[in-house]
Every structure is written in C-alpha cells, then in structure tokens.
C-alpha cells in the first residue's frame, strides 16, 4: 500500500529527479546488502523468535518515520532503515519455517509463505491507491500500525505455541568463520551472482515501470496499481501448477526460465500503451517471477550447511544488490534517454539476461557434485 508508490510520490509530488528517486528506492536494498548476512547470523546465534520480534516492532517505527518525512534526506534515511529491518526479518523467518517443517513439506511451506505475500500484494496496492499513496504519506502510517499488530500477533503465537528451534551447532561459530563458509561455497556464490542480475530485472517492476507509466500514460498511477494487483493475483493462480511441473526438473532450470520470462517481458513494454497488451506482458512477467521466487528459498535451504541455515539465508540477502542496480539503472536510463523507450527497456532486458550464464554454470557444477555425493535434492523429493 505504500512502498510501490514511493517513486511516484517522490517524482510527482516532491519533484525529485528520476535518478535521485532511483537512488532513494534502491537504498533499502543497499542497506540490506550490508546487514542481511548479520541478520541471518544473529538468528543462528540468538534464536529466530527474538530476532523476528525485534525486527517487526522496529519496522513499525520506521514506517511512522516515512509518514513524517518531508525531505529527500529523511526519505533516504527511512528507506535505509526499512532495508535493515527487512534484512534482519527475512532470513530469520525463512530459517524458522525450515526449522519447524519436515523435509518432505519444505517446498510447500516456502510456497505458502510466498502465497501469503502475494495475497497482501493483491489488496495492498488497491488500498494504497484509495488512501492516496501517490499523493501523500498517510498510507505509511497505516503500514506502520499493521507491523505493530503483526508484532503483537507474533508475541501471541510464540506464547501459545512453543517452538523448538533446531540448533545443530551447540557451540556458536564466529561471524568470520560463518562468512568464510559461505564465501568458499562456489555453487552458492555463483548462484548468488546469477540471481543478482535476475533480481535487477524483477526490481524494475516496482521502480522503473511506475515512473515510466506516470510520465508516459494518462492515469499512469492507477494503471500501475491495477497491474500490481494483477501481478499478485496471477502469481497466486499459477504458483502451484507451475511448482508441480517444475519440481520434476532441475530446480535451477526454474530460475533460468524465470529470468528469460522477466527479460523478454521487460523488452516488450515500450511497444504498447494498450491496457490489454500490458496485462499480457505482466502475465508473462509474473510467470517468470513465480518460477524464480517459488524455488529460490528451496534451493538455498538445500545448499545450506548444517547449523547455518540462518547464515545462508542471510548471506543470500546479497542478491538484493539487484534491487539496487535495477532502480539505479532504470532511473539513470529514464533521466538520460526519456524519449527513447526502446533503448531503455532493451538495455534493461539485456542486463537481466546476463544472469543466465552464472545459473547454468551453477547447475552443471552442482549436478557434477551430486553425481558423486548423491542425487540433487534427494531429501526433498
């Protein structure tokens, strides 16, 4: 209801340049890059529940800060803190889900989380548009109250249902050792590199596209709100049929196909302003999104070393570099080539496609390793 409209609010109301807006939007992910590893490590060290509660309540304060922000600097700080909260919350939540689920149900559990997110994305943009997200900051206050309620619900849940978190390593390792373990995992690092470029393409949906629609089309903010809700609705609709199909093949193929769908969808954006055709583009974009995000947590969970799941999920937070590169590149291209839409989106598309060679390399290396050590994802089949 709030963050997706931030770029429109900054450019249309505050008259901030697209390039500076791209930097502000990307700041959230930039801070996540520096703090995500530590968030995952802290969840392994202190426990998921404590870290989740802290991040949820801190998040409510951050959105209240968005509400009172009235300068570029304050929006920059608010979105930086937003990124820190997310980078602490995300790896802890995924690791906790892994802790409380059985191997045979883990893919389904991760996909239920993805479904819950998309249900929020269906109603959030419509509510945000109704509350005037593209014209004022009041929806940020509502979002802050929502996080406050969410934190309270976690307190209730953790008190009612006693959750035993797995602690495979009774003696906690140092953060330097944890960093070295992930850094020396070649498959993990190369997969991360491929995903950074793939995520950079996905990031344009909530940064470059709303600016493009607002500038080039009448009622662009309303159109973007509708397409955002359509994106979430399609994601929920196609998610489980796609997962059922893709679980039969190599999981990294799902990431590769997702990259292709997103790249080509972005390429065709400047060719039309017709709402029906734009809906078709969003349909294919969403299929690519689902192919990536319905499988990636499953992949990282399997690659993680025992006792370091929070650390691995945290280290994978470096993929948010794509969420920095995407808005920055989109903002730069819009500011520099605002009259050449084809050049803008073809550049974006090609940049996204560059993630495929890394993912192909990871798949081949992992298959070679598992040919010696055991079948790929045998514990989850």
Image (cartoon, rainbow, N blue to C red):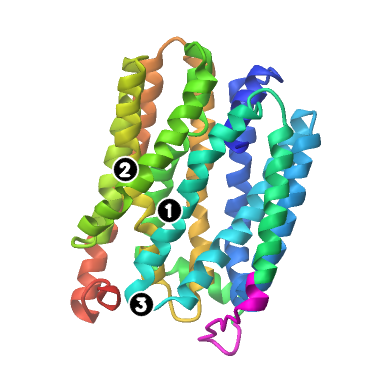
| Marked residue nearer the N-terminal end (2 or 3) | 3
Tell me where residue 161 sits by quadrant.
bottom right
Give the percent coordinates (x, y) of residue 228: 46, 33
Residue 343 vertical placement versus 369 (above, below)? above
In the depicted view, which residue is nearer to us: 73 or 278?
278
Q: Which of the two labelled residues, at mark 1 and mark 2, occupies the earlier sequence position?
A: 1
Residue at point 20%, 56% (across, down): 245
In this view of the protein, can residue 358 be seen by the observer?
Answer: no
Foreground mark, 1 or 2, reads: 1
Q: Which mark is residue 115?
A: 1
Highlighted range, magenta: 157-172
Which residue lies under the disc numbered 3? 103
Q: Alpha carbon of mark 1 to alpha carbon of mark 3: how far? A: 19 Å
* Disc 2 to disc 3, C-alpha distance: 26 Å
Seen at 54% across and 25% down, the residue is: 331
Residue position for label 2:
288
Say which mark, if any, is on residue 309: none
Q: Is residue 327 left or right of residue 21?
A: left
Magenta highlight on residue 242: no
The quarter of the picture where the N terminus appears is top right
Instruction: Label 2, secondary structure: give it.
Output: helix
Q: Do we see residue 111 in this rendering?
A: yes
Measure the C-alpha gap from mark 1 to mark 2: 15 Å
Name the secondary structure under disc 1.
Answer: helix
């Amino acid at each position: 209801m709030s963050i997706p409209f931030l770029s429109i609010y900054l450019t249309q109301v505050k008259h901030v340049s697209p390039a500076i807006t791209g930097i502000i939007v990307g700041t959230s992910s930039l801070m996540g890059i520096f703090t995500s590893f530590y968030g995952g490590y802290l969840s392994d060290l202190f426990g998921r529940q404590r870290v989740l509660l802290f991040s949820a309540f801190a998040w409510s304060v951050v959105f209240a800060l968005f509400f009172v922000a009235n300068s570029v600097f304050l929006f920059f700080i608010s979105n930086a803190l937003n990124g820190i909260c997310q980078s602490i919350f995300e790896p802890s939540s995924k690791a906790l889900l892994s802790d409380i689920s059985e191997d045979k149900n883990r893919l389904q559990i991760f996909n239920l989380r993805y479904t819950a997110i998309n249900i929020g994305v269906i109603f959030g943009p419509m509510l945000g548009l109704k509350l005037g997200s593209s014209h004022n900051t009041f929806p940020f206050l509502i979002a802050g109250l929502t996080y406050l309620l969410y934190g309270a619900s976690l307190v209730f849940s953790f008190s009612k249902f006693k959750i035993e978190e797995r602690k495979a390593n009774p003696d906690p390792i140092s953060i330097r050792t944890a960093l070295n373990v992930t850094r020396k995992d070649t498959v993990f690092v190369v997969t991360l590199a491929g995903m950074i470029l793939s995520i950079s393409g996905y990031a344009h949906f909530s940064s470059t596209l709303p600016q493009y629609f607002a500038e080039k089309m009448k009622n662009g903010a309303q159109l973007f709100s509708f397409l955002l809700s359509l994106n979430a609705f399609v994601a929920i609709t196609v998610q489980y049929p796609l997962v059922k199909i893709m679980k039969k093949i190599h999981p990294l193929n799902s990431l590769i196909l997702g990259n292709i769908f997103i790249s080509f969808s972005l390429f065709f954006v400047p060719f039309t302003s017709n709402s029906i055709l734009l809906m078709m583009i969003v349909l294919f974009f969403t299929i690519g999104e689902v192919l990536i995000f319905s499988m990636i947590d499953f992949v990282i969970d399997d690659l993680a070393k025992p006792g370091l799941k929070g650390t691995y999920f945290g280290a994978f937070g470096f993929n948010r570099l794509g969420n920095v590169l995407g808005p920055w590149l989109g903002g730069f291209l819009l500011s520099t080539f605002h009259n050449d839409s084809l050049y803008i989106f073809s550049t974006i598309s090609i940049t996204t496609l560059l993630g495929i060679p890394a993912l192909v390399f990871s798949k081949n290396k992992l298959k070679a390793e598992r040919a010696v050590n055991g079948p790929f994802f045998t514990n989850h089949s």
